[in-house]
Image: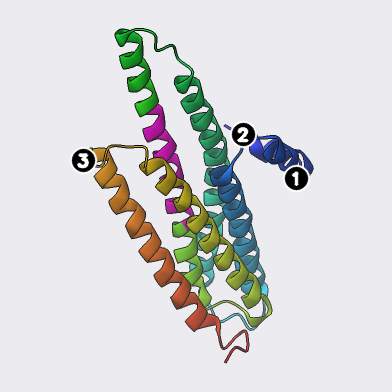
Amino acid sequence: MASATANLTLQQFARQIAAGPTPAAVAVSATTAAFALQLAAMALQVSARHRDFAGAPRAFAQLNLAARNRADDLMRLADEDSAAFNEYLTCLRMPRNTAAERAARQRAAGAALRRAIEIPLAVAHTALDGLESCVQAADGIHQAVAADLAGAATLLSGSIAATLLSVDANLRRLMREDEFYRTAVAQRQELETRSSQACGRIRTILCGALGSA
C-alpha cells in the first residue's frame, strides 16, 4: 500500500506541517530519514558505476535495495504516526461523566499512547538500520560521493535524535512501573547508543575521503 505522504508534493507536505497538529516531529523525521536513505542509495549506485570502484558489487547492490525499501517503510511510518496521534487526541475527547466512561477513556487513551510510542521507536529503528548500512558501505564508497554518504548518515542520525525526543515526551505520560514503559525505555536507550556509535564509525572511515583532519 502506497504512502499517502509520499503522494504529496513537497509544498503540500510543508503546508500540512504548518497547519498542524499533524504531521508533526516524528512524521517529519521519518520523511527526512527516507530522503536520506534515497541519498545513500544514490551514493552506492554512483560508486558501483565508477571504473575504479573498490567495493564489492553484490554487497553494494544489496545495500542499495535495502536503503530504498527502508525509505518506503519510513514513508508508511510517517502516515502511521500521524494516524496514531490523531487517534490519541480522539481518545482524549471521549466522555468522562461517569466512572464507566472515565475507565473506557483511560483504556482507550492508554492503548493509543502506547501506539504513539511504538511507531516512533519503529521509525528510529528503521533509520538506525539505514545508518548502520551506511557504515557498512563507507569503506568502499567512491570519493566522488563520500560527502553524500556522510550527509545521508548525518541526516539519519538527526532523524533518530528528533524521533527519540518524541518518544521521551510520550513516555512521560505513562506509569513508570508499567512493563511497556520499561521495555520502551530500554529500546530507546539502545537506539541512542547505537546511533552515536555508528556516527562515530562513519566519521572515522570517511574522514580521509572527505579531506578532514
Which secondary structure is most common in the magenta stretch?
helix
Most extreme residue toward the bottom is 213
Circle 3 residues within 10 Å: few <14, some 14–19, many ≥20? few
Assign a secondary structure to mark 2. loop
Circle 1 residues within 10 Å: few <14, some 14–19, many ≥20? few
In the image, is residue 56 part of the stretch drawn in magenta? no
Q: Are marks 3 and 2 in contact (CB under 8 Å)?
A: no
**Numbered circle sitting on residue 10:** 1
Report the residue marked by disc 3.
177
Assign a secondary structure to mark 1. helix
Q: Is residue 130 visible?
A: yes
Depth order, front residue of 101/45? 101
Quadrant of the rendering where the N terminus is positioned: top right
| Residue at the image point whose x is 57% and y is 35% from the top | 79
Q: Amino acid at mark 1?
A: Leu
- In the figure, is residue 205 to the left or right of 109? right
Assign a secondary structure to mark 3. loop
Image height of 183 relative to 85, above or below: below
Report the residue marked by disc 2.
21
**For residue 177, which quarter of the picture?**
top left
| Residue at the image point whose x is 56% and y is 48% from the top | 30
